[in-house]
Amino acid sequence: MDDFLSKERYNFSDLIEIVKILRSDKGCPWDKKQTHESIKSNLIEEAYEVIDAIDKKNMSSLKEELGDLLLQVVFHSQMEAERNVFDINDVIDYLVKKLIYRHPHVFGDVCVKDSEEVLKRWENLKLKSKNNTGEESIFSGFTTALPALILAYKAQRKAKNVGFDWDSHEGIVEKIKEEIDEFKNAVNSNNRDKMIDEMGDILFSVVNLARFFDIYPEDALRLSTLKFIKRFALMERIIRDDNLKISDLNIEKLDFYWEKAKKFETR
């Protein structure tokens, strides 16, 4: 153990060994009591922390957060290894075989002209493998436990890869207008359930428009939200500089300071 703890540099095998130790009878009480369910939210949180490091272009943080994300994969695998169901090597074996199968243009004699064709072939290969198990839909086994914006994007992209897509962005724009009109009708009739349904259709159509122009809606919305937060903080600072309290201002005054903040941003 002393030699292990004094190593100058650790590798993937060391990580697996550490997790085994933590989960063992002589390990950590907290680690030993965890289940897939108890730590599943950690997986999501670590993934978003990776995204945050990428957005901030912080490579030191990215290195750390990728390690935290990797830990989640190893940890879940170790729990199943203890039950003799599968271990991390089975996970890796399955992944490598899947990558080879789905990249015949790299590991076989198939030719593709661009990344668009790669995606279409990818979906066809996945559908073929599902059909072999008696599943027939492109959405068989489709993961729905995703943030709604990402879920809509992935569902639309799947449909596109088998030929179900809009011919032009003009058609999508008209669809958005149509959905907005239907939302207005729901508002006028004070139909709450219909309002929720139509709002969902509006957002789904907006995602379609973003995807048509190869814009990842999750990134676009995140950028706009961060811009909003930054501008709002600037507006608050300007209000404080004028010896005022934001809570004392009406919407007209707030709009005035909002526009003032926008002008400051362009300087």
Image (spheres, grey):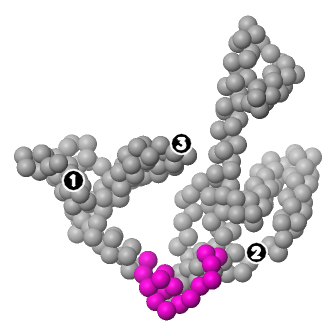
Q: Residue furthest top?
A: 243
Q: Which residue is mark 3?
A: 56
Q: Position of residue 34 (x, y in %)?
A: 30, 49
Give how far apart the Cα atoms at labels 2 and 3 are: 34 Å
Q: Which residue is mark 2?
A: 165
Q: Amino acid at mark 1?
A: Tyr
Q: Amino acid at mark 2?
A: Asp
Q: Amino acid at mark 3?
A: Lys
Q: Residue furthest front?
A: 267
**Who comes first in sequence, dot 2 or dot 1?**
1
Q: Using the rendered image of the protein, determine whether residue 175 is visible from the camera's viewpoint.
A: no
**SS for dot 3:** loop
The disc label shown at residue 10, or none: 1
Viewer-side residue, 223 vs 126:
223
State if disc 1 and disc 2 touch (CB < 8 Å): no
Q: Residue furthest bottom?
A: 109
Is 89 situated above or below 216?
below
Q: Which residues are magenta?
A: 99-116
Q: Using the rendered image of the protein, determine whether residue 176 is visible from the camera's viewpoint.
A: yes
Graded by Cα atoms within 10 Å as few (under 14), some (14 to 19) or many (20 or more), the crowding at tag 1 reads few
**SS for dot 2:** loop
Looking at the image, residue 44 sits to the left or right of residue 203; the answer is left
